[in-house]
Structure formats: C-alpha cells, structure tokens
Image (cartoon, rainbow, N blue to C red):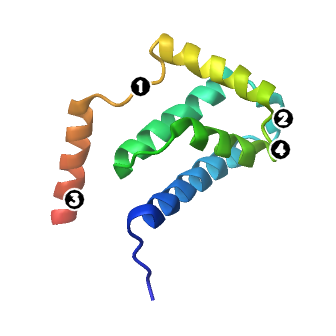
Amino acid sequence: MDLKYKNTLLKVSVKEQIIKEISERIKADFSNLAVLKYNIDLILGICNCIEEAVESKHLKLDKLETFFEIYKSLFGVQVTDIDKVQIQNIIDYLHSIGKIKRKHPIKRLIKLLIVFLLKKR
C-alpha cells in the first residue's frame, strides 16, 4: 500500500528526502568530512543543491534550517551557535557575490518541457 501525503506531511516527507539524498551523495564522495567542515565549495554545493531541490519540488522550505539539518547529518554533531554564525556569514557572502542563485527561468522551462515530452512517450 502506497501512502499519499498531503499538505504538511508532504512538506516534511520531501524535506527529509532532500536531506537524505544530499547527505548520502556527499558522504559517498568524501571519506574524511571533518577537514571540510568550513569548506566554502562544500557549503556552496549544499546551498545550490537545496535551491535546485526546492525549485524542482515547488515547495517553500526554510532553506537555512534545511542546510543546518544536512550539515548536522554530515558531521554527526549538534551545530553550535559559533558554527551557525560562521556558516551564516559564509552563506551571506556567497549570496552577496551571486554564487547562490536560482536557475534562470528559461532553463527551468526547457527542463520542464523535456520532462513533459519524455513522459508523453
């Protein structure tokens, strides 16, 4: 029996799926995550994955909260207030220089068309 979630259950389910997928992908790629704790490229990659996942699922999530849940699952520790401030500063910097951004609407439209045409077959 397949459950169909709606409303808040759907939102929680999709959020958990996003966190699990991103965490597993990063854990599979890097064996020693401890050295990457404040790595700007890792933080940027996680942020862009969250942006893409939220965009594709058409959900409104607290992206920063989702980021810290992924971060917690990667490093297996509670994120301290000092960590949160440092990471928030890095994320703000990445936003200010335009590194974290949503996909261009034309690219999203092209992707939707491709998915639609492939499903039609």
Q: CA distance from mark 2 to mark 4?
A: 11 Å
Question: With 58 as the anchor, is 22 left or right in this view?
Answer: right
Q: Which residue is mark 1?
A: 101
Check contact, mark 4 vs mark 1: CB within 8 A: no
Residue positioned 43% across, 64% down in the render: 10
Foreground of the two, 62 or 95: 62
Q: Is residue 71 above or below residue 17?
A: above
Secondary structure, mark 1, is loop
Reading the chain from its start, which is encountered first: label 2 or label 4? 2
User: In this rendering, which labeled residue sits more in front, label 2 or label 4?
Assistant: 4
Q: Is residue 27 above or below residue 95?
A: below
Q: Which residue is mark 4?
A: 77
Q: Which residue is mark 3?
A: 118
Q: Is residue 100 above or below residue 22?
A: above
Check contact, mark 2 vs mark 3: CB within 8 A: no
Q: Label 3 amino acid? A: Leu
Q: Residues within 10 Å of mark 2 (few under 14, many from 20)?
A: few
Q: CA distance from mark 2 to mark 3?
A: 41 Å
User: In this rendering, which labeled residue sits more in front, label 2 or label 1?
Assistant: 1
Secondary structure, mark 2, is helix
Question: With 93 as the anchor, is 117 left or right in this view?
Answer: left
